[in-house]
Amino acid sequence: MNAKPRLTEYWVTCADGLETLLQQELESFGIQDIQRFAGRLIFKGTLEQAYRVCMWSRLASRVVLPIHRHELEHSHDARDVAEELYEGAISFDWSLIFAPQSTFAVRLHVEREIKVNTQFATLRVKDGVVDSFMEAVGKRPSIDIKQPEITLYVLAGKTEHTYCLDLSGDSLHKRGYRRFMTDAPIKENLAAAILQKAQLAQYQPDIILDPMCGSGTFIIEALMILTDRAPGLVRRFGFNGWHGHDRDLWLSLKAEAAERHEKALEQALPKFYAYDADWEAVKATRQNIIAAGFEKLLDQIQIEERTLADWDDFHAEGKKAFIVTNPPYGERLGDKASNRSLYLGLSALLQKNFPNQRAAIIAAQVEQADVLAFNDPQTLRLMNGKLPIYVRFGTIKPATVTQPFLATWQPQQFEKIEGAEDFTNRLQKNMQALKKWAVKENIYCLRLYDADLPDFNVAVDLYGDRLHVQEYAPPKTIDPEKAKKRFNLALAAIRAVTGLQRDAIFIKTRAKQTGTNQYTKQSTASKRFIVQEGDAKILVNLTDYLDTGLFLDHRQIRLRIAKEARGKHFLNLYSYTSTASLHAALGGAASTTSVDLSNTYLSWSKENFVLNGLTVDHADEQHMFFSSDCFEWLKEGHEQYDLIFIDPPTFSNSKKFYGTFDVQRDHVSLLKRAMNRLNSEGTLYFSNNYRGFELDEELEALYDVEEITSETIGLDFKRNQKIHRAWKIKHQQL
């Protein structure tokens, strides 16, 4: 009759938040009666089971064997923890564990509320081990902090200190394949945990995509799971110098692992896609895949430099797809608002390309994860080093088919609004006239009414399915009470005609702007919405500033730029929220450069880019943003551009700019400087909103100038042809 193998206590440590998943994993190895603590699981088992955890655990950080416990006496008030640790270390004969020829290191862990200088305490543990050796065998082992043969894991506790042998050696998350790193990578065992939580192996997808692959950790961990590759197959461990090491047992487990991997490689694998906007990340992913031993599988992995805006056709129809990624959250992207835009943009792409498919996305704040359009979402909180991360799991909601508001709008039935009959009729007539055009051209944002009637001096703009109503400040000769009553009538008529409720209507009073007032906050409500224009998603703010972030009268010229920008270097001066640059970028511009004095608007610009899956603040400098006076910026640089758009303010003075800008007075010198930066075959579009503006004849003598105002004004502004004037300017050809 065979004797039962002796059971020994082992500790398995893990990152906070992984305890439940790790317990499930250990149970899959046949380990039972597991005790669970924060960051640590304890079980009694055989050496074979401990080795199996070392070889196969994808989630654990360390496997440690408690060797010696030093109980503490509390007869004294003041504790000297460092000396306690020394006493505990010297009281055990360490020559029973390893030979003096072996190198060792001490890793000290301290329970909460214990006050001790950990560096000094670690040295005292080391002293205790060395002195123990000197007493036992008269020889002392050497210290090797970087690659020790033996690692001692010591836990300083409130009632006892525990001295353990770290069977792992280095942390188990270090698989040995990550030779090339990118910023803020996710630890290998956390990546594996996310894949296990998502039940990757059971799901058996046809497509696996990581659109922001970094150093390729998710792709490699997925390969390891699907090819039944043991994480510990090719790495070194901390038990090789241990006297209790059973070499034959370990080699048999290693042979078993190699056999399982070879057998699994015969099975069909999904198609892998690893994308990143950073070429260095793409290189790192490829090199790490090779380092992990998967070079033969590279033909099944599409590794490419791609932005989110440049996704391929995945042909996912009728296939099972799984998307997993670790976006560049936190410090790497900037403020929380930009982060939110990134997640909104990613969510829209997932909805478009992978409806009803599974995804797991990491976020730094749970609010970022909340914008992801998932059915039945689940959240897992983990610690990636010292950073908390939130992993959102779920099935991607299909995108809702959107169409312009006017496509479904029909004239409403409502009771007559006394005193506003003319306004009601005019607004309704305008909407009927614009309906066919808006649907045909797929226009979501447009002007419905612009002070058509003298008594109703308001502008009514449609942004998606919301209205932005601007009251032009009445002259002082008008009785304020009368003006207020008339405006309230207008609001009642607007609600009745459009059928929109009060919460979808945003009101502002527009007085004549001077100086920097146009940049001044009108409110702090921050009602920001995403609207569609052409291929672009644009953030508008209907409450905080006088302007919304999107000048509707320049829609046609922006769409024109989108068509003309492919392969060109585009410059946008007085860029505001850089919507023209965004259209150029989405139209395939080789580069875009946006210049504006306002940091507020430049941050907004970057959000627009990120929302559309484009990269900003990137080493390749494809899309650049400069906070500068346009005159000074033009003077200082030498880069040439193929396409330039200039839409300056009528008048401006700023703390950042010495002096004032007057479009009539200063446009000649502005345009001359800009034309110096325009390629010989290039095109400059110049526009402004100054009603009395006249282009200087000097420019017409110097350049090929064509007024294109009528081509740049949409049907919604046809009643107000003076909303802006626009010119196309080119170099004269010899």
Image (cartoon, rainbow, N blue to C red):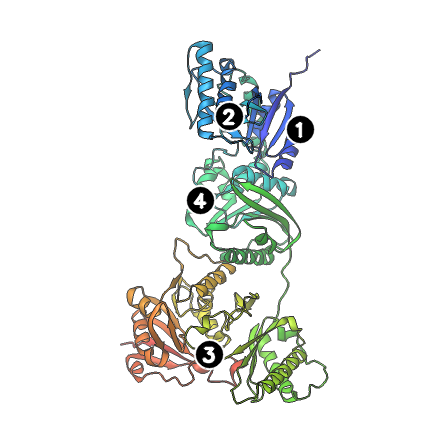
For the residues bearing labels 2 and 4, Cβ distance under 8 angstroms: no
Q: Which residue is mark 2?
A: 81
Q: Earlier in the sequence, mark 3 or mark 2?
A: 2
Look at the numbered disc 3 and give the secondary structure of its residue. Answer: helix
Q: Position of residue 275 (x, y in %)?
A: 49, 50
Q: Residues within 10 Å of mark 1 (few under 14, many from 20)?
A: some
**Quadrant including the N terminus:** top right
For the residues bearing labels 1 and 3, Cβ distance under 8 angstroms: no
Look at the numbered disc 4 and give the secondary structure of its residue. Answer: loop
Front disc: 3 or 4: 4
- Residue in the foreground of this view, choosing between 209 and 238: 238
Amino acid at pointer 3 = Thr
Q: Residues within 10 Å of mark 2 (few under 14, many from 20)?
A: many
Q: Earlier in the sequence, mark 1 or mark 3?
A: 1
The image quadrant that residue 618 belongs to is bottom left
For the residues bearing labels 2 and 1, Cβ distance under 8 angstroms: no
Left or right, 285 with respect to 389, comes to: left
Q: Position of residue 698 (x, y in %)?
A: 29, 82
Front disc: 2 or 1: 2
Q: Position of residue 387 (x, y in %)?
A: 52, 43
